[in-house]
Amino acid sequence: MHYVSAEGLGKSYGIKPLFKNLGFHIEEGDKIALIARNGSGKSTLLKIIAGKETPEEGKLWVHKDVTVALFEQEPSFIDELSVLDNIFHHNHPVINVIKQYEAASESEDADALGDAIVKMDELNAWDFDSKVKQILGKLNIHQFRQKTGTLSGGQRKRVALARTLIDIGFEHRHVLLIMDEPTNHLDVTTVEWLEHYLNQEKVTLLLVTHDRYFLDAVCNEIWEMDGSDLYVYKGDYENYVEKKAARLEQQASGIDKAKNLYRKELEWIRKQPKARTTKSKSRIDAFSDVETKAKQRMQDNQVQLQVKMSRLGGKVAELKKVYKAYGNHTILKGFDYTFAKGERIGIVGKNGVGKSTFLNMLQGIEKADSGKINIGETVIFGYYSQQGLEIKEDIRVIAYVKNIAENFPLANGGSLSAAQFLQLFLFDPDQQHTFISKLSGGEKKRLLLLSILFRNPNFLILDEPTNDLDLPTLGVLENFLSEYQGCLLIVSHDRYFMDRLTDHLFVFEGDGEIRDFPGNYTQYRIWKKEQEEEARLQLTANRLPEGNHIQSAATKVPDTVPQKRKPSYKEKREFELLQKEIEALAKEKKTITEKLNTDSIPFGQLQQFSSRIGELSQLLDDKELRWLELSEMMDDA
């Protein structure tokens, strides 16, 4: 089914054209990632497709049976209303009854809860309520009565994401889901859950994201918007990079040929007499096209600088028996570590475990409760925080950078001017003379990052540097940091970024415990899942009757041929247990449903039963899916 068509779309802000003459088609089942530089109009294009803005030029057609759901970078709410009211904002019978049921579950009104349960039964809303509970639980949304205006930026993002996913969940018609940076401010566990959720849902998807692993997991097509051109690449991000490189090489070759032709035609033009024949007039008209192509400029995002870094002495930083706590909340508990030259460390852990506090203590912004933190005399910190630019008065981009330094030193004895350094980080000459207030949010983050690097620190601390940066800028930053000779400390939920730039990790496990993991982020996630599986298997083994054993995941010999392998004893046993568990869960659900349909149930039991119904629906879904997977293996064996 054909969802969307666009022809000749154009949009400008003032005299600055964002894009023009764009054309594209979206078909049912497409899963598309849109890539472009900050400030080129990605978010505006998404809003145009969603009907939030109108194009100045061109035509847009959306199929009348298609519902367009837009998840924006900066979500809008009615701040005076509660989280519950903002999430369940649609006037739809199923949505209304679930909202009534969730509100009654938090109250002590047995009559209201009983009435909601009856309506849930009538509308067969339990399955959808189970999905709603899964979404709210995975996004860690529990304070339904809290006013939305009191939420933090990250909390607002999660509530907006929950609202969007719930909206598309009850829509049984054709849905086009448009998402603008959905992974910002989400931890890796939540991002991985979102990947799985979007792959399970039958939606057509158009998204903007800087998370390349997320992009590969949910998309099979990439659109690159470059001015008036829209390039389409089928496949994953790696294929896009390869195909784009081939395109740029071909484009550069075409420009070189045009330059040679331009020189010849220019010489011919200069020699022409005033009286011209029809043939020469035709050649003169064609000359304009040749000149335009010859004067094209290729954008080179490959930054390879031999930086003359400020000298870093033998002593970098040393932490001895460092303790830090806020009340009962322990951040560090006797932490010891000595930093070496050129270390590249990633910091991971759940929100609230003290990652930012650790960074502040290292820089002397916060003090330790006890212990010693010794910093080498030659250390120059460069700190990229999430707060963004803090500038008292509005100035032009080039003036802001020149206030830091006029030149950036290179190892070969040369230097780059402020303007040249800006251009390397994708600020063209026109943008350099723009007022900072006119920049987009992503462009301001890029300028902040550039200004920190321009100070030439020898110990870089980057706290979530990838949020709000576009993929072209990330490529520039990664190329720069890959050549960086100083110490590098990174806090990021971007798995691709961490894998490329870090050698080992500080894993904040909570309660003051920090694990030094020898590997990159992906290796840590694999190890963590293996540990969780091992613990789960051990727990299952402890519950089995004596004489039954489950092979340990750590000692299991991997199959040499993964296709149609024979099920292990563990999987056979799991299959047998699943059959019994599914029967028991289905029986329990039936029993509770019958009890809910009777009168005179105490309020406490009524709450427990209604909550258990949702849990049982989710458990049955998960176990039936696993049973089907194992069943196929049994058939192949």
Image (spheres, rainbow, N blue to C red):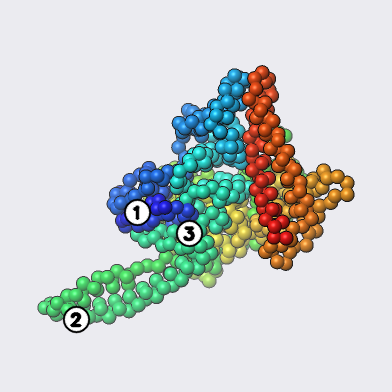
Quarter in which the C terminus is drawn: bottom right
**In which quarter of the view is residue 276 placed?**
bottom left
Which comes sooner in the sequence, label 3 or label 1? 1
Mark 1, secondary structure of its residue: strand
Q: Are marks 2 and 1 in contact (CB under 8 Å)?
A: no
Label 2 Cα neighbours within 10 Å, binned few <14 / some 14-19 / many ≥20: few
Q: Kindly state the secondary structure of the residue where label 2 is placed.
A: helix
Q: Which residue is situated farthest in the front direction here?
A: 635
Q: CA distance from mark 3 to mark 1?
A: 17 Å
* Residue 313 visible from this viewpoint: no
Q: CA distance from mark 2 to mark 1?
A: 46 Å
Image position, residue 439 (x, y; %): 40, 49
**For residue 271, which numbered disc appears in the image?**
2
Disc with the residue nearer the chain's start (3 vs 2): 3
Q: Residue at x 58, y 25 (%)?
A: 118
Residue position marked by numbered label 3 in the rendering = 221
Q: Tell which of 502 and 198 is nearer to you.
A: 198
Say which amino acid is labelled 3: Glu
Q: Residue at x 37, y 74 (%)?
A: 254
| SS assignment at label 3 | strand
Q: Amino acid at mark 2?
A: Lys
Dot 3 surroundings within 10 Å: few (below 14), some, or many (20 or more)?
Answer: many
- Image side of residue 337 versus residue 184, left or right: right
x, y percentage for residue 499? Answer: 62, 59
Q: Which residue is mark 1?
A: 6
Type of amino acid at the residue the image marks with label 1? Ala
In the rendered image, residue 489, in percent from the top left (x then y), is placed at 63, 54
Q: Say if residue 134 shows up in the picture.
A: yes
Q: Residue at 27% across / 70% down in the picture?
A: 289
Counting from the top left corner in percent of width and height, residue 425 is at 46, 60
Front residue of 481/515: it is 515
